[in-house]
Image (cartoon, rainbow, N blue to C red):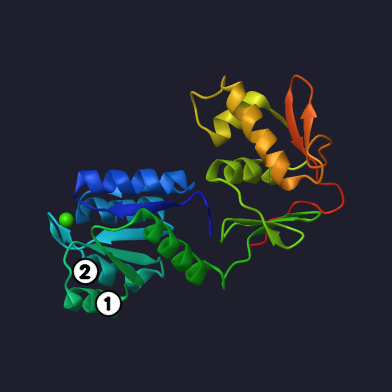
Amino acid sequence: MNPNEPILIIEDDEAIAKILMISLQEFGYKTRHAPDLATARREILTHNPLLMILDLGLPDGDGKTLITKVRKQSQTPILVLSARNDEKEIIVSLDLGADDYIIKPFSTSELQARIRSMLRRTYADSTHEVLTCHALQMNLTKREVLREGVLLKLTPTEYNLLYYLMKNANRVLPYKQILKEVWGVGYQHEMQYLRTYINSLRKKIEINSTRPHYITTESSIGYRFLCHNTASKEHQ
Ligand code: CA
């Protein structure tokens, strides 16, 4: 699973699409939006989505036709999102190859939980994408970080920051570069964000956050994630 691949939201209701995008981005997922089937087909070809959230009632046709088409080519997980509280529609969708469904209105935390479980089911068996450094282990499929086997509670931003640091282990990373890569273009000067998040991350991953082992400060330049004996590696 490539965490840079987007979740494709196929939904003609702009308000719902927006809620979905915001809540998914909050959890660190990239998102793309298609308001109709034609756009969805183009997006699938050009962006290779990680997962699709599919509304059934779309302006240029029934979303179910897309399920059939996608299943002929890939195992990309499909979550059907439907306003129709219609058992038949759901059963047909699942029979055509959808992986799960959710009825509007939905709770975003339930949606998140379903997405995590779909991603686990689809990608866990085929890939083992884990970054390891000493006692720290980051599972990219589950978006989980363990220290000595114990699950750490990281916020989405802390996770994204740690991912960037671990991916570039042992390299000096300038402040501006980290801000640009983790927060985005336009945040290069938000030094206070970075300091705050580095502090909170250290409290969670370091044994002693005042004498950090992993995230070291490169005075007036940036930070460096130290990983000496075990090279940080990504298994595909
Ligand atoms: Ca609709």
How crowded pointer 2 is (Cα within 10 Å; few <14, some 14-19, many 20+) is rated as many
**Residue 51 higher or lower than 17, as above or below:** below
**Residue at left offset 18%, top offset 69%:** 85
Q: Which mark is residue 229?
A: none
Answer with the quadrant where ligand 1 appears in the image: bottom left
Furthest residue toward right = 229
Q: Is residue 56 left or right of residue 47?
A: left
- Asked whether mark 2 lies closer than 8 Å to ligand 1, one says no
Q: CA distance from mark 2 to mark 1?
A: 8 Å
Where is residue 165, by image quadrant? top right
Question: Can you identify the residue that label 2 sits on?
Answer: 64
Q: Depth check: give the residue in front, 163 or 148.
A: 148
- Please, is residue 79 above or below residue 188 in the view? below
Q: Are marks 2 and 1 in contact (CB under 8 Å)?
A: yes
Residue type, label 2: Lys
In the image, 102: left or right of 86?
right
The residue at the point 47 percent across, 67 percent down is: 117
The residue where tag 1 is placed is 96
Tell me where residue 187 appears, x and y as whole percent: 52, 25
Residue 176 in percent (x, y) is at 62, 24
- Image coordinates for residue 130, horizontal then vertical, percent: 67, 59
The C terminus: image quadrant: bottom right
Q: Percent position (x, y) of residue 32?
A: 35, 47
Residue at image coords 49%, 71%: 121
> Is the residue 190 above or below the residue 17 in the image?
above
First in sequence: mark 2 vs mark 1: 2
